[in-house]
Amino acid sequence: GVTPVRQPSGAMAVRRLAALGVRAVGQLPIAGHATLVGSAHRARLLSASAGAPPPPPPRCGPLQDITVIDLTRVLAGPYCTLLLRELGARVIKVENPVGGDDSRHFGPWLPSGDSAYFETLNAGKESIGLDLKQPKDREALHALLARADVLIENFRPGVMDRMGLGWETLSQQYPRLCYTSISGFGQTGPDRLMSAYDCSVQALGGIMSVTGSASRPSEPIRVGISIGDIGAGIYAALGVTAALHHRAATGRGCQIDVSMLDCQVALLLHQYASHDVNGVEPTKLGSRHPTITPFQAYRAGKGKDEEHFVIGAGNNKLFGIVAEVLGHPEWTDDARFASNATRTQHCAELEVMMEEALKKRPAREWVGLLVSRGVPSALIHGIAQASVQPQIAARRMLVDHVCLGTDPDNTAPIAAAYPGAALTTTPEHTGAAHAPRKLLRTAGNPIKMPGILPDTVTRMRSPKLDEQGTLLRQEATEVVPPYAAEEARLQAQVARAVAQALRERPADAVARVAELLSAKE
């Protein structure tokens, strides 16, 4: 059911219902997280501070009531927290007050002199500079943790323990905290203390051994993106959402331990399985698939029209269409190409025959003919070509990072080329003085949740180092004291009882929850 509630008791009811494992949603009038963390005080602080930065944009989405404390830097951790931010979470980025996140010093550079690398990973987050070796700054971190839902860190194993911020310590102080560690090799195992970057886990995990040209098998090739970091970031974000679900059922947070090397192994599940089954070391295959044929890039056209494109025919029906379109329907009667298994055995012979036939037309024409018959086929685009595809525009997969008109990083106004685009600004920060300005355009959110997660074409810019530090320190005076372990156990018991009652006696359960909340008020 839906029950309207008024502030401030309504906000307290929302908090307590959530603590009891009941899904409760507050209507958020100004800042997305404000109802749960002190909207009135936060708004007063902002309006009273001359030249204060605009508040974070309103948050919507399935994680809009979740606060994440982000102790990570560079790529794997910030990518994880970017995904959570895209799903609506409030992300408070804790940085070294001297220099901040290392990636603030990575190019390419915006006209303002700021890092575009950092900007792409940290849009919409808040920044506070804390030296966690200093007791006073650790106290400030604890003030943030007291009302946080998730902590994410990517220090080397043991560092957080030495600062008194390890899982065993914080889980006693904040039983509902979901504690996520991202590291090169995990919290256990003989290599857990080793340093790691993307290139080292790509090398150790095996992905470099299967990447590159078959004609140059001894040349090591790194995957063209930092898949070691990005893979770990994605798995960590998935782990966080699972931990939050676990907490909703039990009332307690848990530890999430994600290793970059583990994620490389997980991404190579077919290669590891293949090696186990046939005992043969998987090798570099260029663009070809190890067990599906035809499934690779082919050369088409002649002379200046020569160009590569891809064909993927994963079954006999599709191969039959390919053979017909290429003018050789008899290939389906050839014993060498009668099944996917035999085509893969004779893939080199088939490649030669297909490329001979493909010389008759340029790649673009072949793609049109194959796609019209339902065969997956595509030209090979660079980033410039990919970025102007109508499909990408229709899916809003390129977004503008923006600042407001009073922001010193103003560059060019946002072009009015996005019909129906929604800017995530607050009512008090609209109008000519606060016209949105573009910093750069980058990849958008591939997770589409119609009616739940707004699909906008803008993101607010990343924070300056410690930009929200003063505000966050002031806001910390409102912190709700951390749950005692006993109270957390009681909440877990109540959550289970409520869940059971809702299944068996829904009407009675709702009345009982209201009675409990009234008594606790």
Image (cartoon, rainbow, N blue to C red):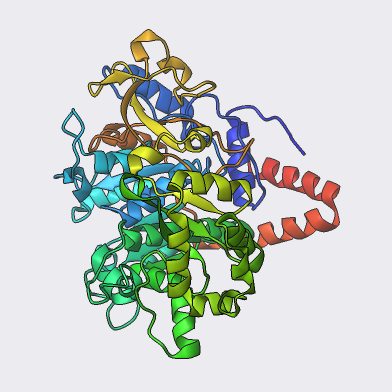
Q: Residue at x 29, y 47 (%)?
A: 94
In the picture, the quarter occupied by the C terminus is top right
* Position of residue 281 in the picture relative to residue 292 (left or right): left
Q: Residue furthest bottom?
A: 279
* Position of residue 194 in the picture relative to residue 317 (left or right): left
Residue 455 horizontal/vertical position (percent): 53, 34
- Return the residue nearer the eye: 219 or 438: 219
* Position of residue 127 in the picture relative to residue 148 (left or right): left
Residue 8 horizontal/vertical position (percent): 57, 29
Residue 488 horizontal/vertical position (percent): 55, 59
In the picture, the quarter occupied by the N terminus is top right
Q: Quadrant of residue 299?
A: bottom left
- Return the residue nearer the eye: 159 or 377: 377
Observer able to see residue 394: yes
- Return the residue nearer the eye: 406 or 300: 300
- Return the residue nearer the eye: 435 or 397: 397
Observer able to see residue 173: no
Q: Residue at x 64, y 35 (%)?
A: 451
Q: Quadrant of residue 298?
A: bottom left
Q: Residue at x 62, y 33 (%)?
A: 10
Residue 436 horizontal/vertical position (percent): 37, 19
Q: In the rendered view, would you say 112 is above or below 206?
A: above
